[in-house]
Image (cartoon, rainbow, N blue to C red):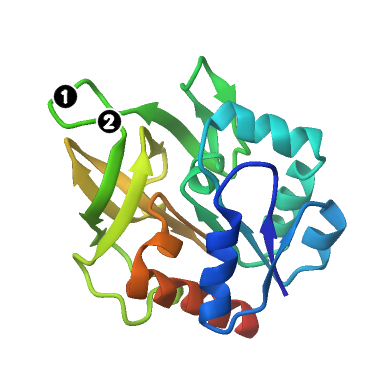
Amino acid sequence: MIAIVDYGMGNLRSVEKGFLKVGVDARIVNDAASIDNAEGVVLPGVGAFMDCIKNLTDMKLTEAIIKAIGKGKPFLGICLGLQVLFSESEEFGVCRGLNIFKGKVVRFPKMELKVPHMGWNTLDIKKRPPIFDGIEDKSYFYFVHSFYVVPEDKDIIAGTTEYGVNFTAMAWKDNVFAMQFHPEKSQELGLKILKGYGDFVSKA
């Protein structure tokens, strides 16, 4: 079973439905024991970084997530679920993240393009994670965000996107896969990623 972490933020049902469509057993959970018992952990999210960290902490889920990643369980972070993996965010003042990856979450600079970045954009694949079987370079995925991650370790950058600036759209290291875009909103290709993640979990 794959645990989709419910911490009071995010489009959980669409993620759950996406997994259901591709035949992957993924269930919404909101307690540490379910995360501990899961074979894989998915952290989706939409909203503010600080609220996410507060909710995870208040619900005593932070340690369970960090422990699961440390044990080598396959982890999938989506949108805000990517951002909170990093050391800190500058949103509403500095807020500490889970510190799985060293780096910051920063706001898009002032520019002619509208912020938030909302809609379809291409992904430049820098290194192909095992959950990306059948996904071609320059494929389109759906984004909704005003902040993006700046990793200290450039080796974890698996994909980038151009929107006024060139930013990290996907990070991958060992058992941790995370993306700024929403696979559950990215139609057929997004479902392929969810299926690829499910297959990876089943083989882990």
- Residue 25 x, y percent position in the rendering: 66, 78
Marks 1 and 2, how far apart at CA: 9 Å
Residue corresponding to mark 2: 115
Secondary element under disc 1, as helix, strand or loop, is loop
Residue 87 appears in the rendering: yes
* Residues at marks 1 and 2 touching, judged by CB atoms closer than 8 Å: yes
- Residue 59 x, y percent position in the rendering: 80, 39
Kindly identify the residue that appears in the image at 49 percent across and 53 percent down: 78
Horizontal arrangement in the rendering, residue 37 relative to residue 90 (left or right): right
Q: Toward which corner of the image does residue 187 lie, by quadrant? A: bottom left
Q: Considering only vertical position in the picture, is 98 above or below 77?
A: above
Secondary element under disc 2, as helix, strand or loop, is loop
**Is residue 28 or residue 66 the one in the foreground?**
28
- Residue 46 x, y percent position in the rendering: 51, 42
Residue corresponding to mark 1: 111
Q: How many labels sit on residues?
A: 2
Horizontal arrangement in the rendering, residue 54 relative to residue 131 (left or right): right
Q: Considering only vertical position in the picture, is 7 above or below 112?
A: below
Horizontal arrangement in the rendering, residue 199 relative to residue 110 (left or right): right
Kindly identify the residue that appears in the image at 76 percent across and 68 percent down: 38
Q: Amino acid at mark 1?
A: Met
Q: Amino acid at mark 2?
A: Val
